[in-house]
Amino acid sequence: MYSLIFIYGITLGSFYNVVGLRVPLNQSIVKPRSHCPTCNHTLTSIDLVPVFSYVFLRGKCRRCKAPISPFYPIVELVTGLLFVLAPIVIGWSYELIVAWTIISLMVIIFVSDIHYMIIPDKVLLFFGPVILLERIFIPLNPWWDTLAGAALGFGLLLVIALVSKGGMGGGDIKLYAVIGLVLGMKLVLISFFLATLFGACFGIIGMLMGKVKKGKPMPFGPYIGLGTIIAYFFGEPLLRWYIHFM
Ligand SMILES: [Zn+2]
């Protein structure tokens, strides 16, 4: 069962790469088929097996031998692993549907934001209603925590955007409303706390390594993704552990 979910996950991960890379450019997500950016060779089925093609071709285009970015198989692999992690952590319940949805959203946002520093409206307009619908049938306890979480996520980011004068993009604000629907009030705060913490840590490491320039904008989406996934799966135990030690 887990290997089946893993294969499902890496296949979707491969699709989310395409969605995350094409939607911000207003390109179709079905046509044209993916091709090698160096020699334009259209990728055939054997080039497109998630993760395995990359390993089998040793990270090179089958025709021109140009190196393929390891970014693609990494995104596929991480999606597969997170898909498997979901039933392990939360068990076999309807909540799994929500878990797989939020993982999917975070992976797409990660790809878009890291490439273009854009969180596409189209992606949020698709996932927002889907998640709202899921939370109607698979509610939080209490049910209104969904709406309160969305309002809190949106409001918190809006205030920070206003105070920091552009430190936070409009995409981040809207994204946090959608995340709030999934997480509810308590966990949306943990998600934001973790995202800020990771962003600051990586920012400082990047600056020390000379990769990030001070004042240069940095995509926040990847950290939001990381913070949200951790808050979703481990927020409650994390909070209990924290309170215990205080
Ligand atoms: Zn090529």
Image (tube, rainbow, N blue to C red):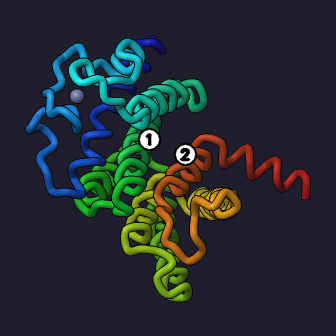
- 14 above or below 3? below
Residue sitting at 54 percent across and 51 percent down? 228
| Residue under label 1 | 103
Find ligand 1 in the image and state its quadrant.
top left
| Left or right position of 155 against 124 | right
Q: Nearer the viewer, residue 73 or 35?
A: 35
The residue that mark 2 highlights is 229
The answer to which quarter of the image holds residue 150 is bottom left
Helix, strand or loop for disc 1: helix
Q: In the picture provided, is 24 more to the left or to the right than 179?
A: left
Can I make out residue 3 in this image? yes
Residue 130, percent from left and from top: 29, 49
Residue 157 vs 106, above or below: the answer is: below
Nearest the eye: 192 or 35 = 35
Q: Position of residue 149 (x, y in %)?
A: 50, 64
Q: Are marks 1 and 2 in contact (CB under 8 Å)?
A: yes
Q: Amino acid at mark 2?
A: Ile
